[in-house]
Image: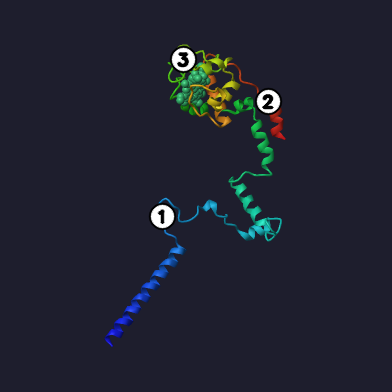
Amino acid sequence: MDRMRWLATGLCVAGAAGALWSLNWFAGQLYPEAKPGKLAYAPADAMPPRVDMAAVQRDWPASLLAPGEGNRLIAYRQDMQGKAPAPAAGAAGAAAAPQADLGTLLTGADANAGKAKAQLCLSCHDLNQGGPNRIGPNLWGVVGRPVATHAGFAYSPAMKEHGGNWSYESLFAFLASPARDVPGTKMSFAGLRRPEDRAAVIKYLATLGNGAPPPPAPKPAARSESAR
Ligand code: HEC
């Protein structure tokens, strides 16, 4: 009889342990534990946005039950949040953006923003009048200056072969990607990818020196394009 009681107690304990374990397992499935370096939940951005269905039914022209309509709505909402490029409405804007010519960019550029961006250049260039050459040549009055002519700086052969003056256009091309524009240049700088940043830096550089040449005029064609 005693042995039976022990057996029953043992079975009860084992059963309870098993039940607890499976409960724990289910809870783990429902509420995954946060692990360091790993998100317990997908970030909210990746989830479909929460939608007030009643308002949507009123506003959305086609029935949401029509095939593909739900996806179109989600894409539309992401457009509105600036998450995805607008495919249809963007056509006019996207076409105008690459056409923004240097003159237009320079007109809209802010020399103060350019000064802030030019901090990137200061590790190698001195910008002061009469300042020294550093890793790169002194850049006082560089806009309009003949290329590779600053006294006392040992330019690379590639830069010496460049020829011409540092015009707004040639600086704009050079600063986008120095190594691509002047293969073999000593200037190990990746470049300023955004045209607006380049225009701002050049506008700032043009304020240093004894009168830079006038900037190129904005192209009227580009303006009427974007106005369309
Ligand atoms: C890592 C250092 C480094 C950085 C950062 C750098 N430059 Fe240079 N730069 C150089 C060197 C070195 C040269 C000389 C290139 C050669 O001789 O091939 C040079 C040359 C130039 C020239 C040609 C000057 C001349 O007299 O012909 C211009 C213009 C110029 N840099 C502008 C800039 C601007 C603007 C920035 C910031 C956006 C910048 N650089 C950032 C190192 C640098």
Disc 3, disc 1: CB below 8 Å?
no
Is 178 or 11 nearer to us in this picture?
11
Q: Residue 154: which disc?
A: 3
Q: For the point 55% across and 15% down, which residue is it?
A: 161
Q: Earlier in the sequence, mark 1 or mark 2?
A: 1
Q: Earlier in the sequence, mark 3 or mark 1?
A: 1
* Within-10-Å neighbours for mark 1: few <14, some 14–19, many 20+: few
What whole-number distance in Å separates the C-alpha atoms at marks 3 and 2? Answer: 38 Å
Check disc 2 and report the residue beneath it.
Answer: 219
Give amino acid for label 2.
Answer: Lys
- Whether disc 3's CB lies below 8 Å from ligand 1 is answered yes
* Within-10-Å neighbours for mark 3: few <14, some 14–19, many 20+: some
Give amino acid for label 1.
Answer: Lys
Check disc 1 and report the residue beneath it.
Answer: 35
What whole-number distance in Å separates the C-alpha atoms at marks 3 and 1? Answer: 55 Å
The answer to which image quadrant residue 124 occupies is top left
Asked if residue 154 can be seen in this view, the reply is: yes
Please say if 47 is above or below 168: below
Please say if 139 is above or below 81: above
